Amino acid sequence: MSLLSINPQMLWSMPSGGEWIIILLVVIIFFGGRKIPELARGIGKGIREFNDAKEGVKNEIEAGMKKGESKAE
């Protein structure tokens, strides 16, 4: 029996409490205590840049829509 035949939604569920502890231990083992703050800063910077780019694209689309509406009038 494969995992998919048992419960296909199992692949999409969030980790539970015990799984988060295991994930944290693996991260600490791989990166060490000193590298974790650098990793978190990098992730935060990446998320911030992604959100800024997302807002820029949204603003460009809205500006294009407004420009198209003014030409239609």
Image (cartoon, helix red, strand yellow):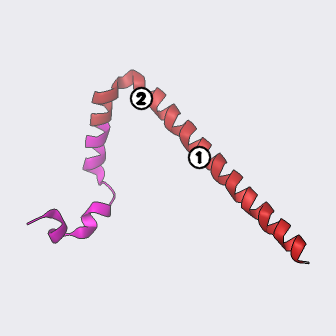
Query: What residue appears at the point 66 percent right and 47 percent down from the top-left corner?
Result: 52
As shown in the figure, which amino acid type bears the numbered disc 2? Answer: Ile
Q: CA distance from mark 2 to mark 1?
A: 21 Å
Relative to 69, say whether 39 is above or below: above
Q: Is residue 50 left or right of residue 35?
A: right
Q: How many marks?
A: 2
Q: Which mark is residue 38?
A: none
Q: Which residues are magenta?
A: 1-24
Residue corresponding to mark 1: 50
Query: What residue appears at the point 31 percent right and 46 percent down from the top-left corner?
Result: 20
Mark 2 vs mark 1: which is more N-terminal? 2
Image location of residue 3, percent across then percent down = 16, 63
Q: Is residue 58 magenta?
A: no
Q: Is residue 68 left or right of residue 25?
A: right
Question: What is the secondary structure assignment of the residue under circle 1?
Answer: helix
Residue extending farthest top? 34
Image location of residue 42, percent across then percent down = 51, 33
Q: Which mark is residue 36?
A: 2
Decide: few, some or many residues near mark 2? Use Cα within 10 Å; few <14, some 14-19, many ≥20: some
Residue extending farthest right? 73
Image location of residue 60, percent across then percent down = 74, 57
Question: What is the secondary structure assignment of the residue under circle 2?
Answer: helix
Q: Is residue 12 magenta?
A: yes
